Amino acid sequence: MQATSQAFQRNVSAALQNPALQKALKNIKIGFVRKRAAAVAKLPEFELLRDAGCELKNHVLDHLDFYLERFEAKVIESGGQVHWARDAAEANQIVLEICRSVNARLVTKGKSMISEEIGLNEFLEAHGIRPVETDLGEYIIQLRHEHPSHIIAPAVHLNRDQIADAFQAHHAPYGFTERREEPRALLDEARQVLRQQFLRADVGITGANFCVAETGTTVIVTNEGNGDLTQILPRVHIALSSIEKVVPTLEDVSLLLRLLARSATGQELSVYTTFSTGPRRRDDLDGPEQFHVVLLDNSRSGMLGGEFQDMLRCIRCAACLNHCPVYGAIGGHAYGWVYPGPMGSVLTPQLIGIEVAAQLPNASTFCGRCEEVCPVHIPLPKMMRHWREREFARHLTPAAARFGLGLWAFVAQRPKLYRLATNLGAWLLRRLAASKGRIRSLPLAKGWTAWRDLPAPQGRTFQQQWAARRENRL
Amino acid sequence: MSEIREQILATVRRGLQRGPLDEARRAELEVRLAHPPRHLLPARAQGSHSEQVALLIKMAEYALATVDQVARMDDVPAAVAAFLARERLPTAVVMAPDAELAALPWENQPLLRIERRAARDGDKVSVTAAFAGIAETGTLMLRSGPDRPTTLNFLPDIHIVLLPAERIVGSYEDGWDLLRATGEAMPRTVNYITGPSRSGDIEQTMQLGAHGPLRLHIVLAGA
Amino acid sequence: MTTSPPRVGLFVTCLIDLFRPTVGFAAVKLLEAAGCVVEVPPQTCCGQPAYNAGDRATARSLAQQVIAAFEPFNYVVAPSGSCAGMIKRHYPSLFADDPDGRVRAEQLSAKTFELTLFLNDVLGVERVDAHYAGTVTYHDSCSGLRELGIKAQPRRLLATVAGLELRELEESEVCCGFGGAFCVKYPELSNRMVSDKAAHILATGADTVLAGDLGCLLNIAGKLQRDGATIKIRHVAEVLAGLTDIPAIGEPEGDE
C-alpha cells in the first residue's frame, strides 16, 4: 500500500470535513469504549491479568529465538510447513508459490493485518489470482478498493448507505439486483455471496492472533466464523503471522485471551477462537490437506533490545485506537498507512521509515489514554516521544519549529533574560487585547487564533508581582 | 530458505545481545513447556461444580446461545426434536458420526431425519457433541477427529451442541488439562465457541449469523 | 510536639506566571492557610516543551536549573498536573546516563506535588474556607489524572466550598486538545477536540468550568469565548482560595 502519511495534515483536513466519516466515528465512542469499560468492570482480576500479560510478552521477547524454533519444529511434527520471510516481498512470493503449486485461482481470506502490511491482495491480483476477503468489514472495503481504517473493525468509517451502494454495484452477478439498506438484509446478502466463494476457493489465507510453541498451533479469533470457513474448506490453509506472535503454551494463550476480547470489543470472549494444528489427519472428513505458516519479520527483530521493544508486546486489540481522541476525530485513513492510532504511530515509522511517517508520532497530545487502556501496558506516549527525539536528532523536525524551540530554549535557560522577555510579553499581549480581556487575532499564533481567542495576561507577571510584594514587606 | 531463517534468528539474538541460549536456560524453558504454569485464574472460574454449571448457562445465554437442560443423556434426542418442533425448524439433521452421539436413542424420534457426515452447503441443522464446557465465559470446546468434522460447527444455520454436565469445567486451563488427560495428540482443530456467529461491521450494530450459525443451541445433559 | 512548618517552593509554571498570576497567589494563599511557608525561587519553565519536541538536551538543562533552584525546599508544589507530572514522572529518565543527576532528580521527584493533591493527600487538608455561589463543572486534565492520579482531591475540596454545586462533565477524562505545541502544530485537530469539550461543558448547564491546568483552561476559554459562550472559566485554585472577585479567564476587567 502506498503510504500517504507525509500528507497527514491534508488527510486530517479532509477527514474533519467529511460528514459521513464524522458520523461513523461517533459509533466508536458509544460502542467500543463503553463496552470495554463494562467488560472490565465485570472481571475483578483484570488489572492483575494486564500485569501478567505484560510480563508474559516480555518473557517471550527475551526468548523469542527459542520459542520460534520450537514452534517451527512442532508445526513440522504435526505435518505442516513453516516459511520464514524477512520482508513483504519474500512473504508475498512464498504465498504466491504455494498458490501456484495447487493451481489456485480463487483465494478466500480471513482478516489479517499482516496481509495488509505486505500488500498481499494487490500482489496476488497482479499474478492472476483472485483474493476474496470474507470478514464482512474487510469484504466491504475490498469492494470499495479501500484499506482498513481500523485494525479490528476495518469498515468502521462507513455507513449503511455506502455499504448498500457497494453491494448494489457488485452483487448483480449473484442475483441481487435490488438495493437493500437494512443492516440485516445487507448481512444476509453478503452471507449468501460469500458462501459461494468459501465453497469454491482453492486456498484459504488467515492471520494468526497467536502461534503456540508447545503444540505448533496457530490461533485465530473471530466473531463471524469467516476465518473458520476460510481455513477448513479449501485444500490449502496458509496462516500469516509475524514473529512476535509466538507464545509458549496454551496456558499463556488462555491469559491473553482473557485480555484480548475485553479490550477489543468488550466481549467476554470472541465467538470463535480456533486452534489449528497441522493439516487434516488421516480419516478426517474435512479440513485442509496442506497447512502452511508464514513467519514474517519485516524489521520487527530490529526492535528488540532498543527503545521500541515494548511495542512487540502488542496483541492488536485496538483499545488504543478506540480510546484515542485523535483517532476518534479523524479515523484511520488519515494516518496514511496500514496501522492507525497510537499503536500505528509507534509501529509505522519502524516499518516504513521515520522520514515518511514523521508526522504520526507528533500528532498526539500525550493525553495518555492509550497507555491507560493497553492490555499489556505498552508505554505508547513514551515511544512516540522517542520517535520525536530521533526526528530532532536527525533534523527532521520542521525548521520553523526548530528555530522557535531554539529561541525559547535560549531564553528559558537564562532566568533574568526570561523575566525581561515575559514582562515584555505580558505588556505586549495586554496592549493587543486592549480592554477586551482576550485577543482575536495574533499573526504569529494563527494556529491558535484561527479557531480560538487567546485570553490576555492579567497584568504584570507573577514573578514581577511577587518580587514587588517581597520588597514592600521588607 | 534456511538462510533467511538463520538471518532472522541472528537478528533476534543480536537485538537481545546474546548468542543462542545456554543449556541451563534452555532446560528451564523446556520445563516451562513440559509443565505449563498457570497464570492467575479469575475467581469466577474456580467455584464448585454446581456453580460452574450455573455460570456456564448464564454466560452462554449472555453470549446469546440458548440452553436446554435434560436429566439424562438418553433424554437428549427428545430434547433436540422438541427444540426443532418448538422453533419450527427443519427436522433434517446432520450429525457428527460420533460414538457418544450414536449411543443415544435417536430411534425414538422418528420425525428426525438424520444423516451422519461432514457438513455440506445447504444443511440447515447440525448436531455435535462438545468436548468440554468452559464456565467462565460460557464457551463450548469442540475438537476435530474422524468422527467429529469441523464443518458441522460452521456451515449449517442452526448448530445444536450436546454438552454433558460432567464435562463442564471452570477455566480454559481446565479444558486443556482435560484434553491433555486423554493422552491423544493435539487435535487438528479445537474450536472455542461462545454464542452464535455475529458481525458488528455495519455501523457497529450487532447482527447474528454472519457466516457461521445464526443460532447456537446447547443441550446440557445430566445437570 | 512542635515542628517547624514545611517550606514549600512554589513552582508557578510559565503559563501561570505570564497569563494568570492570580492562580499563583491562590496557591500561596491555600498553602499558607495550611501552615506552609511558601517561597518562590527564580524560575522559568520545567522543560516540557523541549522534552515533548524530542529535544532532550534542552529538557535536561532546564531540569538541572529547576533541580538546583528547588532542592533546598521540603516540598515543591505546582498548581498544574502537567508541570508537576513532568518533574515527578519524567525528570529521572532525563538522567539515565548520569547517576548523580539521576539521584538528585529522583529526590526532587519524591517531594514534588500538584497543588490539590498536596493539600488533600499530603497535608490532609479536608476543607477550604471559601464561598462561591454557582454551579461548576470540572475537566480532568490528562497529565494530572493519568500521571499523578488526581481525580478525587479537587472534588473533595470543592465539595467544601460554600454555595458551590458540582455538576459532572460528560467525558471529563477526554483530552481537550491542548497538548502544548500540539494545539498550534495541528490546529484543526485541536479545534475539533476542544469543540467537543466545549459542547460537553455547555451541555452541563453549569455557569463556571474549572480545571487544574492553565494550558487546558486557555484552550477551553479561547474556544468557548470565540463561540460567544458566556460561561466563566477559572482555575480550580482560584475558587478554592476564594479569589473569584477578579475577572475570570479571558474576561475583560470590570465585567464582573
Image (cartoon, rainbow, N blue to C red):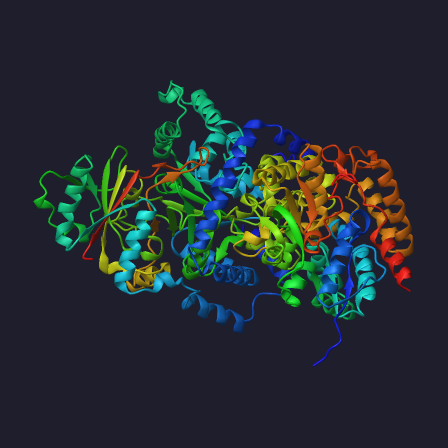
Q: Residue A353: where, in percent of width, then height?
A: 68, 44
**Residue in front for this viewpoint, A182 or A292:** A182
Identify the residue at image location x=71%, y=56%.
Answer: C241
Q: Does the image show residue B146?
A: yes
Identify the residue at image location x=44%, y=51%.
Answer: A39
Position above or below: A403 against B19:
above
Q: Residue A435: where, in percent of width, then height?
A: 82, 36
Q: Residue A49: where, in percent of width, then height?
A: 48, 60
Extreme residue toward the bottom, this view = C1
Placement of the N terminus of chain A among the 4 image quadrants: top right
**Residue in front for this viewpoint, B105 or A233:** B105
The answer to which image quadrant residue C147 occupies is bottom right
Q: Is residue A116 left or right of residue B50?
A: right
Q: Is residue A93 left or right of residue C235?
A: left
Q: Is residue B161 left or right of residue B42?
A: left
The answer to which image quadrant residue C122 occupies is bottom right
Placement of the C terminus of chain A among the 4 image quadrants: bottom right
Position above or below: C109 against A141:
below
Extreme residue toward the top, this view = A177
**Residue in front for this viewpoint, A156 or C105:** C105
Number of marks present in the image shown: 0
The answer to which image quadrant residue B56 occupies is bottom left
**Residue in front for this viewpoint, B188 or A172:** A172
Q: Is residue B67 left or right of residue A301?
A: left
Q: Residue A362: where, in percent of width, then height?
A: 70, 44
Position above or below: A189 against C184:
above
Q: Does the image show residue B2?
A: no
